[in-house]
Structures are given as structure tokens and as C-alpha cells.
Image (cartoon, rainbow, N blue to C red):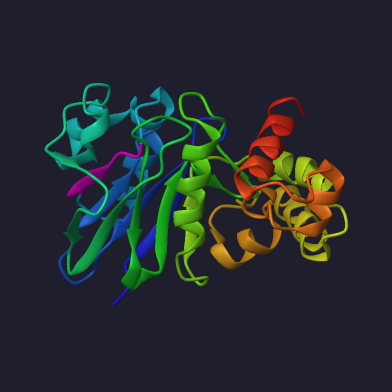
């Protein structure tokens, strides 16, 4: 039975997620931006936290951890590569490692680029991947530490997951990302339809995260360097995919 996954808005534009296994009662939190909404969600559902999964060390993904653990002692899992910058870990993991939430296997992917040591958590049986600030809804994270080659490798791993995978990313940036994407591939009808859907959702106060991987593949310019329209607009018809990606990222940084 798939995990029940709850999206929790935090701070001004962050998301945390709770993944609950009804059979075992185990509940995992992905990232810890703000304690109050996370603790309120646990209380309202009478869930007991068993695991905290940290994607990377940035403050808006870890700062609430102490307050959450004070109320719900739980096993903290994060990247071995980034252990020196993360809160104290109970389990340090690397790409290819796996662990379980109830009966569900959780796989670890190295998705460095936004930071070096950023990881994603893939739960195949629940068709879910928690990507935080690597692959984002209609975007990808700014390259604070990694290189375009690293980020493109990371995005390529995520793009290779089954297309019905649901992408749980870390921020409500989708509307702004859509405005940029439209400058890169304005002839993409799927993108135009998505932009309209996003506008309706945000006008109603609704979240645009999570999204489906199939939708990201169809609309997210950072996953689409092979698009003839994107290549023509950038004047990079014959460039390698990674160079097209790097130019899209450069333009987004200056947008």
C-alpha cells in the first residue's frame, strides 16, 4: 500500500512533506523548514514521527529540526558527503543506499549541483521522489556550489525515473519559473497550458507542488535542452545538451 504523503507549506515559500505508512504507523518528515506547521500536521493526524530525511544543509531545510525532535524523537537521515554541515545524523547515506519506511524501500540519489552533497529520496512503490532544490516545479536550483555538469547529471538521473513519478520539490517558485520558461520555449503548448493552470491555482491559494515527472519533462526548460525551439532561440542548434542546459541556467540567473 503506498505511503500517504502530505504537503506542508512552511515559511514564505518552502515545503516540507510527511510520508506515513498506515500499516506500521511510521511517519517520515522530509526537510524541516519550520516547526509549527509540521508539528500541527502531526498532531492533527495523530501521527508519530519516526524518521527525518534531510536533503541538504541550507538553513531553510534544517533549522526547525531541534524543535521537531524535542516533540518527536526520530531517526535523522542525511548525506554522508554533507554530514559535516548537516545536523547530527543517525544514519549517513550515499547514492545507491536504501532504507525502509514501514515496508517501503527508500532509495538515495546524489543530486549535487545546488549544493555538493544534495540528495534526493526515491520511493518507487509510492511513485514519489523528494527532490528539494535539485529538480523543482518548472525549474531547478541555482548552482551555489556545483557545476552545470554536476547539475545536468543530477537532473538526468531524475528524468530517467518512471514518468508517473510524483516530484515533491522544496519551494513554491512555480509561477516565477513559468514566466522564465515562457521566454525560453514560448511555442510549447503544454507549457502555456501549465502556466494557465498555475495562475488559477495560485489565485485560489493552492500549492503547485507536487508535480508529475511527465509534466516536468514536457514543460520544464531545464529538462528540455534537446528541444529544437530552445536550441534555435539560444543559437545552440548543435551544442551538447549540457551546454544548452548551462545557458538556460545562466539566463535564469539573470532573469
Quadrant location, the C terminus: top right
Identify the residue at image location x=44%, y=48%.
131
Which quarter of the figure has residue 59?
top left
232 versus 255 height, above or below: below
Image location (x, y in percent) of residue 98: 20, 57
Quadrant location, the N terminus: bottom left
Identify the residue at image location x=68%, y=27%.
253
232 versus 145 height, above or below: below
252 versus 162 height, above or below: above
The image shows a total of numbered marks equal to 0
Outermost residue on the front side: it is 238
Q: Is residue 151 magenta?
A: no
Horizontal side of residue 205 vs 179, given as left or right: left
Image location (x, y in percent) of residue 20: 28, 61
Image location (x, y in percent) of residue 194: 75, 59
Horizontal side of residue 59 vs 250, given as left or right: left
Image location (x, y in percent) of residue 108: 28, 52
Outermost residue on the bottom side: it is 1
Which quarter of the figure has residue 254?
top right
The residue nearer to you, when weighing 199 against 118, is 118
109 versus 149 height, above or below: below
Q: What range is drawn magenta here? A: 49-55
Horizontal side of residue 113 vs 173, given as left or right: left
Amino acid at each position: 500500500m503506498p505511503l500517504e504523503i502530505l504537503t506542508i507549506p512552511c515559511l514564505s515559500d518552502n515545503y516540507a512533506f510527511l510520508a506515513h505508512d498506515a500499516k506500521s504507523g511510521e511517519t517520515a518528515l522530509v526537510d524541516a523548514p519550520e516547526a509549527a506547521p509540521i508539528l500541527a500536521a502531526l498532531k492533527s493526524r495523530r501521527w508519530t514521527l519516526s524518521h527525518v530525511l534531510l536533503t541538504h544543509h541550507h538553513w531553510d531545510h534544517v533549522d526547525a529540526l531541534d524543535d521537531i525532535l524535542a516533540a518527536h524523537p526520530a531517526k535523522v537521515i542525511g548525506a554522508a558527503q554533507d554530514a559535516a554541515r548537516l545536523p547530527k545524523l543517525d544514519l549517513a547515506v550515499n547514492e545507491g543506499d536504501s532504507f525502509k519506511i514501514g515496508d517501503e524501500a527508500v532509495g538515495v540519489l546524489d543530486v549535487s549541483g545546488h549544493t555538493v552533497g544534495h540528495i534526493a529520496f526515491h520511493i518507487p512503490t509510492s511513485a514519489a521522489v523528494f527532490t528539494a532544490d535539485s529538480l523543482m516545479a518548472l525549474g531547478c536550483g541555482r548552482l551555489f556550489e556545483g557545476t552545470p555538469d554536476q547539475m545536468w547529471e543530477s537532473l538526468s538521473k531524475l528524468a530517467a525515473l518512471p514518468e508517473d513519478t510524483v516530484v515533491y520539490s522544496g519551494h513554491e517558485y512555480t509561477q516565477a519559473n513559468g514566466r522564465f520558461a515562457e521566454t525560453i520555449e514560448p511555442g510549447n503548448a503544454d507549457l502555456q497550458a501549465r502556466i494557465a493552470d498555475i495562475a488559477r491555482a495560485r489565485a485560489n491559494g493552492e500549492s503547485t507542488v507536487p508535480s508529475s515527472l511527465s509534466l516536468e519533462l514536457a514543460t520544464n526548460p531545464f529538462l528540455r535542452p534537446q528541444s529544437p525551439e530552445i536550441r534555435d532561440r539560444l543559437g545552440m542548434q548543435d551544442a551538447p545538451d549540457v551546454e544548452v542546459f548551462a545557458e538556460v541556467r545562466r539566463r535564469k540567473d539573470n532573469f
